[in-house]
Amino acid sequence: MMLILLETMAEESRQATAPGILEPLLVRMQAGEQEALAELYHRARTAVYGLALSYLKHTHDAEDVTQDTFVRIWENVHQYQPRGTPLAWVLTIARNLSLMKLRDRGKTEDMEPEAWARLAADSPLVTAEDRQVLQAALAGLSDEERQVVTLHAVTGWKHKEIAALLDLPLSTVLSKYRRALQKLRDILEGGEKP
């Protein structure tokens, strides 16, 4: 059930951030329309927050990077060229800001327990109980496994796109995703504690 929920979240994200939806928003932003920025924020904030959280492991820092990402997008939208997926451009900005925050901070911290559950908060399919189960299950994964699974769920991206964003070989992303899904199955079906 929980694995189906992750796939459903990925499909919802794919629909909300489809290039045919985001591309016109960025073009409108280039024309100075602030309403387009609000719509872009509404559609892409979960993916941006999920990426930032996967790097920073701290909700406050991830929220800061999320806000900074949309400010940076507004300031630099004139540089956007429709050569790929608009979400890739947005997430590249978020990734760079996350890495800068990590360098400034100089260390990583443990993930706050409630942080991952927040990613599912916008989905009407996710109940409070589902969030608790998902949080416990994700805690049983390594940082990289959690990052790959979470990015797939919140962006709806294919593994090739996640590999490009994270600068990892596709084979590494695939093996981490498969390993993470097996661990999640073991935890969720076997009742194991993470």
Image (cartoon, grey):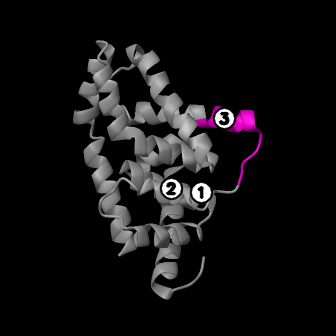
Q: Which mark is residue 101?
A: 3
Q: Earlier in the sequence, mark 3 or mark 2?
A: 3
Name the residue beneath numbered marker 2: 148
Query: Which is closer to the viewer, label 1 or label 3?
Result: 3
Q: Badge 1 local density, few (<14 within 10 Å), some, or many (20+)?
A: some
What's the amino acid at mark 2?
A: Val
Where residue 69 appears, x then y in whole percent? 49, 30
Q: Are marks 3 and 2 in contact (CB under 8 Å)?
A: no
* Membership of 22 in magenta stretch: no
Disc 3 or disc 2, which is closer to the eye? Answer: 3
Badge 2 element: helix
Q: Nearer the viewer, residue 106 or 185?
A: 106
Q: Position of residue 78 (x, y in %)?
A: 39, 13
Dot 3 alpha-carbon crowd within 10 angstroms: few under 14, some 14 to 19, many 20 or more? some
Which stretch appears magenta? 98-109
Q: Which mark is residue 144?
A: 1
